[in-house]
Image: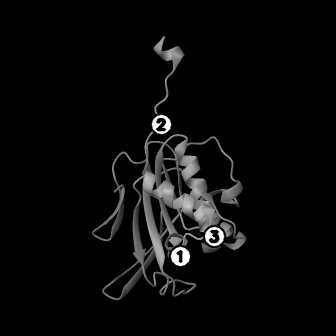
Amino acid sequence: GNLTLKDGTLVLKAGTMKKPGFLRLRVWAIDENVRYYGVATAGYDIDCIEADENLQHILKGKEFRVVYNDFLTYDTMKEYDLIVMNPPFSNGCKHLLKALEMQQRNGGAIVCLLNAETLKNPCTNDRQYLQRKLTEYNAKVEFIQDAFMDAERKAAVEIALIKVQLPEVQRQSFILDG
């Protein structure tokens, strides 16, 4: 895929991000009982959307640009090569559907941590629609049990790590072609 872990380092495949991108990625790992935690930036222009004011202050203190506080109502014409998200589990389905909608306009990748129950229990129309879209785009889904047991806010929950690449949209220009 476009995002891999190699020798303990998160690696973006060359050419994945051609333009400024939305990236909010918290990285944690345990290697030989040593915990590592940080925020990956990949050296690109990053827009952050964070609802929690305390987390907004932390992001700004680390010189991240917080562009908005609600992803579901975020409206932009900006194109993002990559959206990395860890939405609230209570409405993660709507967040991922919004990200898919944004990437359908121009193409691009999405990496999303979602409550596994969202995919395993398609009990709503939104969840069923999400499953259809993920199948349509050949999304890769990995289920991870107890992923947040070592997190600051511990939770014994199964998550789904979703990676999906939407195809680049080809546009014709009558001005440039003519």
Q: Seen in the image, is 34 located left or right of residue 134? A: left
**Figure quadrant of the N terminus:** bottom left
Q: Secondary structure at mark 1?
A: helix
Residue 47: x, y in percent? 59, 54
Closest to the camera, between mark 1 and mark 3, is: 1
Residue behind mark 1: 117
Does label 2 or label 1 sit earlier along the sequence? Answer: 1
Q: Is residue 102 above or below residue 55?
A: above
Does label 1 or label 3 sit earlier along the sequence? Answer: 3
Q: Secondary structure at mark 3?
A: helix
Q: Amino acid at mark 2?
A: Val
Residue 100: x, y in percent? 54, 52
Answer with the quarter of the image where residue 55 lies: bottom right
Of residues 128 and 153, the one nearer the viewer is: 128
Q: Seen in the image, is 37 located left or right of residue 129? A: left
| Residue 169 circle label | 2
For the question of whether residue 169 can be seen, the reply is yes
Rate crowding at label 1 as few (under 14), some (14 to 19) or many (20 or more) other CA atoms within 10 Å. Answer: some
Q: Residue at x 53, y 47 (%)?
A: 103
Of residues 141 and 42, the one nearer the viewer is: 141
Residue behind mark 3: 58
Answer with the quarter of the image where residue 60 lies: bottom right
Q: Amino acid at mark 3?
A: Ile
